[in-house]
């Protein structure tokens, strides 16, 4: 029940924030190229993010907030927005899956997701960060990767040639050269 109330609150908040700011958005009934019936869920919003349409559901908002909380709970707010932006940047990037859920549950994409599941409960700051990213704020300038160089165990992440690198808090956000 509490989760449903959270989702209703977030959906209402998203609508009010998106329609009060300068973001291109469309009503859900314009959706015709995405199979939402298979998910049995309604689109909360369709937004134009970096000139690509992204279909966002209540579950997507919750999943994004979970990732933001798990990956950046001790980071500054800008770092939380950056983590949410990476998720959206991956959705529109040709090398990644095309939905928020698929990006988040992609194998080894986020260290906090195990066997396609994440159990963290997001806080209000995580939801606010997701909403900022959904409004189009991207402090990473289109980065699709991030890591904390002080604690990262992935040699790939440490040694890959990076482009468009930006440090926010303890994380480094980047593209691959």
Image: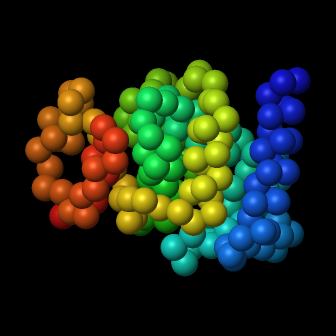
The percent position of residue 74, horizontal first and vertical second, equals 44, 29
* Residue 101 sits in quarter: top right
* Residue 94 sits in quarter: bottom left
The percent position of residue 147, horizontal first and vertical second, equals 29, 40
Residue 56 in sight in this render: yes
Q: Residue at x 69, y 56 (%)?
A: 56
Q: Residue at x 58, y 23 (%)?
A: 120
Who is closer to the viewer here, 177 or 40?
A: 177
Who is closer to the viewer here, 56 or 2?
A: 2
Q: Residue at x 49, y 55 (%)?
A: 85
| Residue 28 vertical position relative to residue 39 in the rendered view, above or below | below
* 121 sits left or right of 71 in the view: right
- State the scheme by which the image is colored: rainbow
Who is closer to the viewer here, 150 or 107?
A: 150
Q: Residue at x 50, y 44 (%)?
A: 77
* 157 sits left or right of 76 in the view: left
The percent position of residue 79, horizontal first and vertical second, equals 43, 45
* 37 sits left or right of 176 in the view: right
* 155 sits left or right of 145 in the view: left
């Amino acid at each position: 029940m509490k989760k449903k109330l959270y989702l209703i609150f977030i959906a209402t908040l998203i609508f009010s924030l998106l329609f009060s700011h300068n973001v291109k958005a469309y009503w859900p009934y314009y959706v015709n190229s995405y199979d939402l019936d298979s998910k049995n869920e309604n689109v909360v919003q369709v937004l134009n993010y970096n000139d690509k349409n992204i279909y966002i559901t209540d579950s997507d908002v919750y999943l994004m907030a979970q990732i933001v909380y798990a990956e950046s709970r001790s980071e500054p707010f800008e770092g939380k927005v950056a983590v949410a932006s990476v998720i959206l940047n991956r959705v529109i990037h040709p090398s990644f899956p095309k939905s928020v859920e698929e990006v988040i549950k992609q194998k080894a994409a986020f260290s906090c997701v195990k066997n396609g599941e994440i159990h963290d409960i997001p806080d209000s700051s995580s939801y606010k960060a997701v909403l900022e990213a959904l409004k189009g704020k991207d402090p990473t300038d289109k980065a699709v990767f991030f890591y904390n160089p002080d604690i990262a165990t992935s040699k790939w992440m440490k040694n890959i040639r990076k482009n468009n690198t930006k440090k926010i808090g303890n994380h480094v956000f980047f593209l691959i050269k």
